[in-house]
Amino acid sequence: MSLPERRYVITFGCPDRTGIVARIASFLAEAGGWIVEAAYHTDPDTNWFFTRQEVRADSLPFDVGELRRRFAHVQRELDGQARIIDTAERRRVVILVSREAHCLYDLLGRVASGELDVDVRAVIGNHLDLAPITRAHGIPFHHVPFPKDSEGKAAAFTELRKMVDEHDPHAIVLARFMQILPAELCEVWAGRALNIHHSFLPSFVGARPYHQAYTRGVKLIGATCHYVTAELDAGPIIEQDVIRVDHSDSVPDMVRKGRDIEKVVLARGLRWHLEDRVLVHGNRTVVF
Amino acid sequence: MSLPERRYVITFGCPDRTGIVARIASFLAEAGGWIVEAAYHTDPDTNWFFTRQEVRADSLPFDVGELRRRFAHVQRELDGQARIIDTAERRRVVILVSREAHCLYDLLGRVASGELDVDVRAVIGNHLDLAPITRAHGIPFHHVPFPKDSEGKAAAFTELRKMVDEHDPHAIVLARFMQILPAELCEVWAGRALNIHHSFLPSFVGARPYHQAYTRGVKLIGATCHYVTAELDAGPIIEQDVIRVDHSDSVPDMVRKGRDIEKVVLARGLRWHLEDRVLVHGNRTVVF
Amino acid sequence: MSLPERRYVITFGCPDRTGIVARIASFLAEAGGWIVEAAYHTDPDTNWFFTRQEVRADSLPFDVGELRRRFAHVQRELDGQARIIDTAERRRVVILVSREAHCLYDLLGRVASGELDVDVRAVIGNHLDLAPITRAHGIPFHHVPFPKDSEGKAAAFTELRKMVDEHDPHAIVLARFMQILPAELCEVWAGRALNIHHSFLPSFVGARPYHQAYTRGVKLIGATCHYVTAELDAGPIIEQDVIRVDHSDSVPDMVRKGRDIEKVVLARGLRWHLEDRVLVHGNRTVVF
Amino acid sequence: MSLPERRYVITFGCPDRTGIVARIASFLAEAGGWIVEAAYHTDPDTNWFFTRQEVRADSLPFDVGELRRRFAHVQRELDGQARIIDTAERRRVVILVSREAHCLYDLLGRVASGELDVDVRAVIGNHLDLAPITRAHGIPFHHVPFPKDSEGKAAAFTELRKMVDEHDPHAIVLARFMQILPAELCEVWAGRALNIHHSFLPSFVGARPYHQAYTRGVKLIGATCHYVTAELDAGPIIEQDVIRVDHSDSVPDMVRKGRDIEKVVLARGLRWHLEDRVLVHGNRTVVF
């Protein structure tokens, strides 16, 4: 990641009230914590308070375990939910793919160049097409074919789940993985499974969004990175972007132009997720 | 408009085949026509050919009536449909409004500064709020109240139609006019009635699109200028644009940010329509 | 402005060290202050800490004068510089113009609609062109002609300064005012004079930037809102934006397209300035 | 490239006058040529006419050699300059690199996936860092070290030139190649050498543009794809794009964000160049 030195990242949410910032800041100040980055937000509809704080690890006289123990008091006092990560623990990622190469290729390039400093444990594909590029990066590729029949598909998902879960990944990235996750997997992987959908959601849910966009005659096409939930393409949105098209663009032109948006939107969304910048609240996200 | 000298603008569509460009270009060349701007497109699905040509009026030895008569031969030969406008005939525009000022205000400013050289014949509002600004620009404002009951509404639309049609306008601009046109009016004004919808269509059709956008948690909001058809917010799209929002933007923030997109998208769409740059083909547009 | 209820806005800068956030937050918490919005930043080069806090006025048991007195202790302790504004005091604005209408027109529209809730005390022009539109909004227009000779010009600036200073404005907006402020005025109005330059600075400083852009053959043109300093077009940048152009765009086309960017960039920059979101640091800005 | 079937691409420029389009179109129509795409432009300053036409190869009863011979008559008649390419001849590309991987990696991914259907003959680097990724794609990598002394550098450029010229490439891509080409090479490769500069030119010419951008405090950073000429970063611009930054972005953040723009701008510029969509006119480009 882009974090230059070891940090503890605290994300915290609680019902809003006076004095929360003071409570957290005082807690950190008393321990000598050097806050490198801090962000706050209150949702006006639900009156829920959110914060994310990055603290230099070497500024605290104790380790992350002790930080978690001590912060538990603050958390209880404020009736909130905290999560504390240590950037020294490299983020584990599993990537699910099908045949389309561009998102996987782009992610692997970012990892190879050190821009995205994560541990890609495995790439799993329902086709073999992307095995060579994956292996050229020294990353294991697993092939899990998905039959058309529901029984075979269920078995494939069981196998997939096993393969994914053994790595206990911080992120499961659906990099143009064309299979729809069963509700059960959506639940198990809730908040960790990120999808890139090749439209500007909520427009053009489901299959062949560029064809839908072409038929509707839109003047911009987009891509959406979102958390996977049981309802198709309806999960909390992390990031979106668009690119201009016009009447001279055929569907293949849209597919080509869209790829450049898809890969950058997915990369941004994944980075923010792994830096623990994304706080889900209902079906919306706070991105600090 | 931005045309510096008098021009004839020819738009033409016909089934695609070899030699169309040669036929049209030769016709113009033989008459001495100086083509200032030319654009071509063929729709690959329907194999329909489109072109738009701007010719300097002073390069032709005859007037627009004669140009139309002569071009009728080309049209018949190619089994197509032509439209020829003379930029010396100022475009007549009627603007329909409700209470929201920004789109009207922006259009009037462009007209006043000469950027948009059109003849705004009237502004018609179902509320009186925008009468003063309209009249300050020396433009007649008509008030047509829209009752809630269907009978009263029908009568109001009859009155509206009469008021609009007496100007035989080239464009009827729904500048955040909040009433839904009856199917009959959509038909009568087909290809001349432009609406600005405050979302990136097809997302968030209908009422309160910014509320819908907020609830869905999108990261970009948009605006769409489209031709009005009987199906709500489903007509051919002329132009769209978007602006970034994040979790800190409330609905009123989105409303405010969205206005800047709405007005510019409407102004662009109207300009292109009046310069006869927009060719409707099914539910899509070619914008030359 | 967009602030729905009365607030005190505290902006503060000081050398970075541990415990600043705790100190400020505790100060506010002890007084019962309800923080509605808070932002922090540390400049890594100079190790300077910045914060901006919005506090609900009705959550504090004292007025803004007492808040300033009490906060002075915090300020001294942290060796910093604070500024506290009360949103109940409407921001006073003076606008300087020449002949170009679009930026003035756009600002007046935002004021008239209530989107920009400021007190425009006067519009001052070196030409009379924009007097009618200004007066139609019920705002005084003053004409200060600028002769070409340096003596006459100096006298004009003296008169201008007097006219501006009598309003003690929070913002002096150069809305396409084509005169270059003398160094002395830049100093007197430092941090309050905002200019809109019609290029993406630092490209195309000085006169006729669209001509420069055309000659260079750029594919995007832009606009920059910045604080005025003695060096021409070199002051701290508040906001910038761009729009796409291509080979078919003449200089007048660029001028027309550019206007849509200029007015929105100026409006954004002015809003942020008046909400005290812009903190100048050397020649850069922090925009909270 | 994205061309689905074999085409001849004609680009042509000549002094503007009446009848040019008719002449070219009639020439093609008489031969039965099916025009798939056509674009026109006249430069108003120099009165120079430009066109680009894509004709289906199978619609003509002769080959590209004969087309060139026959079109030479048209060319002479109109006193113009024509270039005709056959899309069946795959475009040859040589890529020059240094240590930065992202542009090369992105281009190779596009080639590998078939999106960019070109023949990358060689990658030449002044460092060895990018040899492995190049060779993993089955493409020869040549190492030409560039000493600091002028003599050694001149020798290196001689070697580089020999290596490049033996492939007679349609494009020489400086994909973050950090050496400045000598004037002589700029001339030999004129119109074929494309550079990606990591700023929104003409801002921040030369070394370390992101540092320059950071120091100036701009709110958007950009990238520019341009033809290489003897004057540094001053050649005709093919494509540009920008991305938003703010005060929280350090120079490394800008470098990271900028990469996503650099690679997409370079890929677009290269595609357009290879499809012969870019016509240079003085120091500006027409991009059809």
Image (spheres, coloured by chain):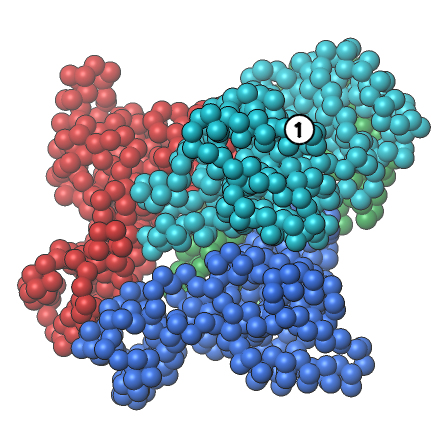
Chain colours: A red, B cyan, C blue, D green
- Residue under the image location 27 percent in, 62 percent down: A40
Q: Chain of mark 1?
A: B
Q: Quadrant of the N terminus of chain C?
A: bottom left
Task: Describe residue C109's horizontal placement relative to residue A124 as left or right.
Answer: right
Q: Pinpoint residue A144: horizontal percent, then vertical percent.
A: 21, 26
- In this view of the protein, which residue sits in the foreground, B161 or A80? B161
- Residue under the image location 66 percent in, 78 percent down: C181
Vertical comparison of C4 with D89: above or below: below
Local packing at callout 1 (Cα closer than 10 Å; few below 14, some 14-19, many 20+) is: few
- In this view of the protein, which residue sits in the foreground, A51 or C188? C188
Q: In which quarter of the view is residue A167 placed?
A: top left
Q: Which residue is mark 1?
A: B165
Q: Pinpoint residue D202: horizontal percent, then vertical percent.
A: 63, 60
Task: Describe residue D228's horizontal placement relative to residue C114 as left or right.
Answer: right
- In this view of the protein, which residue sits in the foreground, D198 or A191? A191
Task: Describe residue A282's horizontal placement relative to residue C256 as left or right.
Answer: left
Q: In which quarter of the view is residue C164 placed?
A: bottom right
The residue at the far right in this view is B61
Q: Is residue C252 visible?
A: yes
Residue kind at label 1, given as amino acid type? Asp
